[in-house]
Structure formats: structure tokens, C-alpha cells
Image (tube, helix red, strand yellow):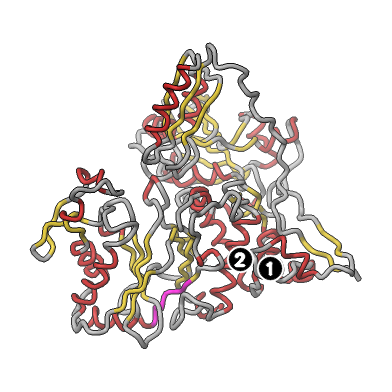
Amino acid sequence: MPTILVSPLDETPRPATAPAPRLKTLAGKTVGLLDIGKPGGAIFLDRLAVLLEQRGAARIVRESKPTFTKPAPAEVMDRLAAAKVDAVIEGLAD
Amino acid sequence: MVEKLLFFFETDCPTCRLAAPYLNRLGAKVTAISQDGEEATAEFVRQTGLRMRVEVDDGLRLSRRFDPEFVPALYLLDGQGQVLESHVGFDKEVLNRLAAALGSGPIADPYDGAPSRKPGCGSRHREGGQVRDVPVTSAGVSPAPATRMALDDSLDPIDYCRQFGDPLPVVPPTVERVERMLRATPLPAQELVARVPPNYGAATVEKIAANAVMAGCAPEMMRVLIPLVRAACDERFNIHGIQATTHFAAPLIIVNGPVRKELGFACGSNVFSNVARANSTLGRALQLILTNLGGARPGEIDMSALGNPGKFSYCIAENEEQSPWPPLHDGSAVTLFAAEPPHGVSEHTARSGREVLKTICYSLATVWNYRSCAGREALVVIGPEHARTIARDGITKDEARQLLFDNTGVPLRVFENTDAEGTQLVKMYQEITIDGQRCYRKFQSPEAIHIVVAGGTAGKFSAVIGSWATGTRGSLMVTYPV
């Protein structure tokens, strides 16, 4: 008699999502910088903004989450989408 | 003339569950319309405490007439039943606008810990890409049954099951054992209890039962586990953040009421340790559910820098019999607190209640770090001997909390000439005098200090447990009745 087990794992079906296409160049692109609100995040993203502009990014859009403990609220995502960003860099952790 | 609001909901939709208590505040002006059967609807009403008129949408006729794409769906109607405004999903601004249209004040506080907006679920009548005529089952539409796995005789089930658990061996979740668990609950096996963050895996009754078997739970534990999983996945508790943080936080379960004795929860000596099957298995079952269904495995999504021994199991019960004060919750209930490990407070010589509390204050001042004030909470677990000394001096529980609040501070001098964490925020801190010394107040309000009496009757010990990020920007303590 084989032992029959009930799977205790998550079996929620999820459609695979392809990662966003990588940018081939920064020239003329709009880059969103998302600060999750941890100490030091702004220092990192300020420097990144300078470097991105030096490398040809046309526009930098700054956004921040109201709290780092929760996923970005819809408003933040909507504002990034409305700014028509080509890519977003998230400043995670301290 | 605005007449009333219709609230279409599904019983397994987390966004509908989120919206329900807000709409309760509009009372008789709202009619709720369930897209599921009588039984599932009655259970939803019980769980969410829905107080408005509730109708079951028989044959989904109303749903097809109004034809919302998603639920929750809200329709503001005039006296003739004409739609003045409609909205799908959860949106606090919309809720307040609709409340104003109905002549009520705001019903959704923007800073109550819940998200300001949350998308809903596909409306039942549109499931499968077409308008459905068939009535749904009493339990609503549920996730598929768990996969059955037949093990070859050459495999040792305990070895095979190592992939499902924490690093300790688990009890193999055989069909027979899982069925024994399922017989202990009136809920159908496929009913969705919650979606577990951060991956939002479906915690059906059957999946909860399989994990409970692995943790070593007795079947009767299902009556505690179901509300516990709901509590853990309550938006206010923010298990998403707790599971993903690099901090020490782990959900600490506190059990109150008659269920302690009924199921054998320990609340006396060794309350935090390996003393009772009920405590150890309930805490372990929650952790297995969080990792197996929520997906936050250590070393993957859970990258906690130092971790917490409570991630094996972290469950205490309040020693209500030895407590001179009202319990944390009156009646059978589970409470969750995003907790660091316990920090012991030994005090053997103080003769007065006030001095015992002052000793606890000095430990409380070190929560998070000594120089960080105002942003955290703490759970103070007072041992019965300390509690007796405090109560003997006529100090009530509220007075004890106030005394801890008023006497926990950090001297101004320790903030001088440093850039250490907390020192940048001193402008926000409140200056007070404690025993003639200028200090910053450690906590923002007395409510940031929670008190529970637990532990054995011999030994003058208490414990202070620091929180993770708290309040509406972090985790709020939640209590669910059992």
C-alpha cells in the first residue's frame, strides 16, 4: 500500500509573467527612482540620478512609498505609469 | 435624491472583506448583496460582523442586471432605483464621497493601517469569461483540491516530507490524518480561509489541515487555527512586511479565554518554551502555513538578518487565573503581535509595585535601541509574582500601563555628539522629567504598551518584548475570537 500524502504547499495557479524588456540604451529614456523610505535611500538615489543623467537619461522621475513595510500603494504605481517611465529603479533597504 | 447604496460582494474576496467594516458605518443606508450561497454568506456575515441588510443574489440575477466587472461593487441609487454613481474595488476616497452623498461623515480614515486602494476580484457572474446562469455552491467558488502524492514504498515518508517543513522532521500529511483534521471543523475542505502574503497562496481549510498535521496538532486545534490564519492575514497585521523584513519580527500568538483549558494551552511556568503540545504545535502550524502557503522561506524571501527562535513556534496563553487584572481579551480569542524574542526582567528585591514597574521601565527603554523613541510598541509579559506585588499596592492594569508610559524615558545626554539611529529624530520626541532627570519619552502613547500576565507562580520575573515597525505604517496588533 503506497502512502498517499496531501500536498501542504501552495498550488495557486499563476500565469508566468515575462520580465520587462531591458533597456538597450539610456539615451532619451525616462527613469523612475522609487525610494521605499528607508534611512539613506535618498542618498543612494540622488547619486544614481546624477549617474543616469551623465549616461544620457532624458528625465528622472522621483517617487517614494509612504512606508517601507508595505507594498507600493496603487497611487504610487499610477503616478509612475502616468509619468511614462521606461524603467524604474527601486532603492531597497538601508 | 440619494436613497441607498448597494454593496455586491463575494465571500472569498479579500477586498470585499476589507470593505465590509467600513460600509458597516453607514448602517441601514447600505444593502449588501452576496454572490454566494446562504451558508457561505452567513459565515461571511459572522466573520466580518456585517450589520447591514444582506440579501443572497439568487441565480445572480441582480449581478447580471447591474453587471459589475469586479467586486466589491458599489451602486449609489436614487429613490427610483436609478444608478447615480458606481465603483468597483476598495478606495477610501470613494467610500468617503459615497458616505457624504448619503449624508454621513467620513467612514474611512486614511491612516487606519489599511491600504487606501485595493483592486477587487472578478464578479461571480462573469467568471470563466462569460455571464453565468448557474447558481454558485453554498461555499462559493473555491480553489482546486490539494494534489495527492502517492509515495513509493522505497521512500521513507518522514524523509520525503523534509521538503515541506522547517528543518525538524514533520508528521507526514497522509490522507487519513488530514481527513481526521477536516472532520474536526464544520467548514468544507475547499473553502478559502485567506490568501497568505507575500505570495498570496490560497489557505483552504484542507491546506491548513495538511500543515496542522505536519506541525503535530491535535484535530481539535482546527477551531483555533482557522481564526488564527484569518488574523495573520488581516491587512492591519501586515504579515507581508513581517515575513519580508530583515528585522527579528515573528508573529507571537497570545491565547485567551476558555479555549486555553479546553485545548490544553500552557499559561504557567515555561510559558514561552516547550511545555505544552497545544502551544508548540499551534505556533509551529502557523509558521508552516506562512512558509508553505505564503512563500516566505528563510534564506529566500525571508532574509531576516538574525532571525528569531520564535519562528519555530511562538505561542503563549495568558495566565488569567493568576492575574489580578482583566485579560488582554475577554473570552476565547487569539491575538497576534509582531514580536522580537522575549527579554527577561529579573527583579527580586523591590518591595512595592511601583518599584517593580520602574525596573520594567528600564528594560522598556532599550526596545529597538536605547536612543530610538516614539516609533515602537512593546508587550510586557508580567509574571504572576510581579503582578501580585503590583496589584497589592492597589495599582490597576490601566494605572500600571500609565506608570510604565510616564516613567520610561531616555536621558537627553545620551543623544549628544552622535549620529546613531534615533538621534536624528529628537525634534519629534517629547521631553519629560523622570526622577529629576530630563529625558525623551520612549513611547508615543500608553496604548503602545500592551500588558499580559503569564508564567509560573514561583519566580520574580517578567519579560519585555519589542515590536517591529508599528501602527498604521507597520503592524497593528489584531485579535480574533475563537
Badge 1 or badge 2: first in the primary sequence: 1
Q: Which residue is mark 2?
A: B285
Mark 1 and mark 2 on one chain: yes
The magenta segment is: B316-321
Q: Residues within 10 Å of mark 2 (few under 14, many from 20)?
A: many
Q: Are marks 1 and 2 in contact (CB under 8 Å)?
A: yes
In this view, the residue in front, B466 or B214, is: B466
> Where the N terminus of chain B falls, by quadrant?
top left
- Numbered disc 2: secondary structure: helix
- Numbered disc 1: secondary structure: helix
The residue positioned 68% from the left and 68% from the top of the image is B214
The residue positioned 46% from the left and 78% from the top of the image is B271
> Looking at the picture, how far across and down is residue B396, in whole percent?
24, 73
Residue B146 location, quadrant? bottom right
Amino acid found under the numbered disc labelled 2: Ala
> Looking at the picture, how far across and down is residue B444, in whole percent?
26, 53
In this view, the residue in front, B438 or B208, is: B438
Q: Chain of mark 1?
A: B
Amino acid found under the numbered disc labelled 1: Met
Q: Is residue B105 a member of the stretch shown in magenta?
A: no
Left or right placement of residue A40 versus residue B83 in this view: left
The answer to whether residue A66 is above or below residue B213 is: above
In this view, the residue in front, A42 or A16, is: A42
> Looking at the picture, how far across and down is residue B48, in whole percent?
51, 52
Residue A35 location, quadrant? top left
Q: Chain of mark 2?
A: B
Can you see residue B25? yes
- For residue B214, the mark is 1
Q: Residues within 10 Å of mark 1 (few under 14, many from 20)?
A: many
The answer to whether residue B113 is above or below residue A7 is: above
Q: CA distance from mark 1 to mark 2?
A: 7 Å
